[in-house]
Amino acid sequence: MIRFFKQLFGQKQAGEQSAASTAVKTAPLSEEQLEAVSRPVVKMNPPQILVGTAQSPGLQRDHNEDTLFAMQAILADGDNDLPFGIFIVADGMGGHQSGELASRAAARSMSEYLMVRFYGPFLAGESGSGESIQEIMEAGVREAQRAVLRSAPGGGTTLTSALLLGEQVTLAHVGDTRAYLLFPDGRMQVMTQDHSLVRRLQDLGQIDEKEALVHPQRNVLYRALGQSEPFRPDINTHTVPKPGFLLICSDGLWGTVPDDEIYRIVFSAPNPSIACNELVAAANRAGGPDNITAILVQYLG
């Protein structure tokens, strides 16, 4: 089992940082958050994860085009004590039902692929085909791309997937759905790169972050599932914060609610489920201009 675990991570070092992850946000801690952080850390044996999810069509859309998938489990056999899970958010686009069909096809295809190609061999203690986790994730995105082209011609979707194994999380990302790591010291770190026109304009120094949020072409993507042009997803592996959180959310949340408010809600809520529902409520209070989806994962080691 240990050999299988090491083989799956391949040549890349656990905790490898992408270019997008260098952008660090900080937020002041409230007294309530400081009190929560200062509480004694209880050692969990075996380590565990808590997961919350929430979703809303928003206030200005008549239907939901986001799809989420969340699965968690734990293996504790006296040799390896490993929590693991699959977490996916897909934000569809294309009008009519094309976006809804595209996000559904992508999330279902990706989750099925990972369960068959990764979790089946992992639970059986098999060494698998020799593929690393990064290779399995990339192949899963290619399978999701084929599913979108079959099921929703003319539609498209983002896809941000997280495969958590022990203290390591591997992200496969296409589009502008985001994954964040939130740390108790005030940091909220973006772990994905937006594949959007406004992100590219920001990188070129032509607009700043505030201008990007209100830019008329802020929803235009240059990379998404359903596009005919070939592409490679961004694949990176990171160490999850202990204590801390992994947040995956569509732009209906991060494009509407400021980072410091997201951070405050996450660290003030008693559990991830309540936090996700409060995040969705905050986005709707801010006008709810788009579909809203959030998955929040807390690692307890």
Image (spheres, rainbow, N blue to C red):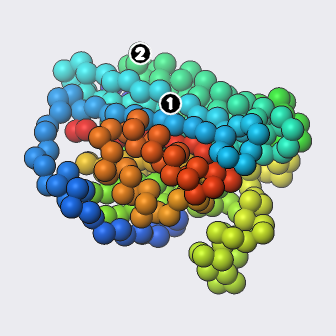
Residue at the image position 61 percent from the left and 24 percent from the top: 112
Q: Position of residue 179 (x, y in %)?
A: 51, 51
Q: Position of residue 166 (x, y in %)?
A: 33, 36
| Nearer the camera: disc 1 or disc 2 | 1
For numbered disc 2, what is the local secondary structure? Answer: helix
For numbered disc 1, what is the local secondary structure? Answer: strand
Dot 1: within a 10 Å radius of its alpha carbon, few (fewer than 14), some, or many (20 or more) residues?
A: some
Which of the 4 quarters of the picture holds residue 89? top right
Vertical position of residue 209 compared to residue 109: above or below: below
User: Dot 1 corresponds to which residue?
Assistant: 70
Which of the 4 quarters of the picture holds residue 94? top right
Q: Position of residue 241 (x, y in %)?
A: 31, 51
Choose between 42 and 38: the one closer to the eye.
38
Residue placed furthest toward the bottom:
205
User: Dot 2 corresponds to which residue?
Assistant: 124
Residue placed furthest toward the top:
124
Image-based side of 112 in relation to 240, left or right: right
The answer to whether the residue labelled 1 contacts the one labelled 2, judged by CB atoms less than 8 Å apart, is: no
Which of the 4 quarters of the picture holds residue 99? top right
- Tag 2: residue type? Ala
Vertical position of residue 146 compared to residue 284: above or below: above
Q: Is residue 6 visible?
A: no
Residue at the image position 53 percent from the left and 45 percent from the top: 280
Residue at the image position 61 percent from the left and 39 percent from the top: 56
- Tag 1: residue type? Ala
- State the mark number for residue 125: none
Image-based side of 110 in relation to 25, left or right: right
Q: Is residue 118 visible?
A: yes
Image-based side of 117 in relation to 85, left or right: right
